[in-house]
Image (tube, grey):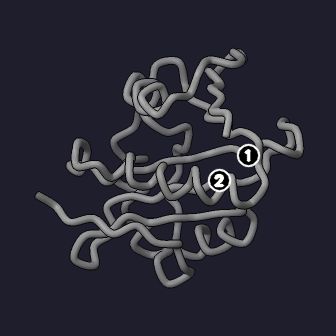
Amino acid sequence: MTRLHVRPARPFDAGAMATLLNAIIAQGGTTAMTEPVTGADLRDWMQEADIWHVAESDGEILGFQWIGRHPGLPEDACDIATFVALGSHGLGVGSRLFDATRAAAKAAGFAWIAARIAPGNEGGQAYYRSRGFEDWLRTGDKVIKRFDL
């Protein structure tokens, strides 16, 4: 069994996180992102989002998650994004990341977390549903789920 360690993400993690995310982007179907990102891009994003976590095993990043404010949400809500390395699903990466993120979001004073998911992203829908997110709003291209803290 893979031994996972979840910790706050740091700028030095950005290169490995970009590599992980670019593999997901290249595969397609589970993220709205279509263009590759760089470590510098992620370092910039880390300055904008409130809370970032990575899950690693033996020094290898197997997933990451962040929450941040979104202009379409009330002040007491945050948006979430989750990425798990290809081939690392079913190891508890997403579960462990969300445990850390949920606790950090509550400690930061957020009342709820929103997840924006493409209707065709069945894996993303299932992941957030299994964490306790409920359908909140549907827009033309997204299902927005809500998790009350």
> Tag 2's secondary structure?
strand
Alpha carbon distance from label 2 to label 1: 6 Å
User: Which sits in the foreground, 47 or 4?
Assistant: 4
**Residue 114: horizontal and vertical position, in percent?**
67, 36
Which amino acid type is shown beneath numbered disc 1? Answer: Cys
> Tag 1's secondary structure?
strand
Which image quarter: residue 118? top right
User: Which sits in the foreground, 59 or 24?
Assistant: 59
**Residue 80: horizontal and vertical position, in percent?**
61, 45
Q: Quadrant of the N terminus?
A: bottom left
Residue 67's disc is 2
Which amino acid type is shown beneath numbered disc 2? Answer: Ile
Residue 92's disc is none
Q: Which residue is drawn at 38% across and 47% down?
A: 94
User: How many badges with numbers are in the image?
Assistant: 2
State whether residue 23 is above or below residue 45: above
**Residue 31: horizontal and vertical position, in percent?**
49, 39
Q: Which residue is drawn at 56% across and 81% down?
A: 11
Q: How crowded is mark 2: few (under 14 residues within 10 Å), some or many (20 or more)?
A: many
Q: Are marks 2 and 1 in contact (CB under 8 Å)?
A: yes
Q: Quadrant of the C terminus?
A: top right
Query: Who comes first in sequence, dot 2 or dot 1?
Result: 2
Q: Which residue is drawn at 20% across and 66% down?
A: 3
Residue 78's disc is 1
**Residue 77: horizontal and vertical position, in percent?**
78, 42
State whether residue 88 is above or below residue 47: above
Q: Residue at x 28, y 73 (%)?
A: 60
State whether residue 109 is above or below residue 61: above
Q: Which residue lies furthest to the bottom in this view?
A: 12
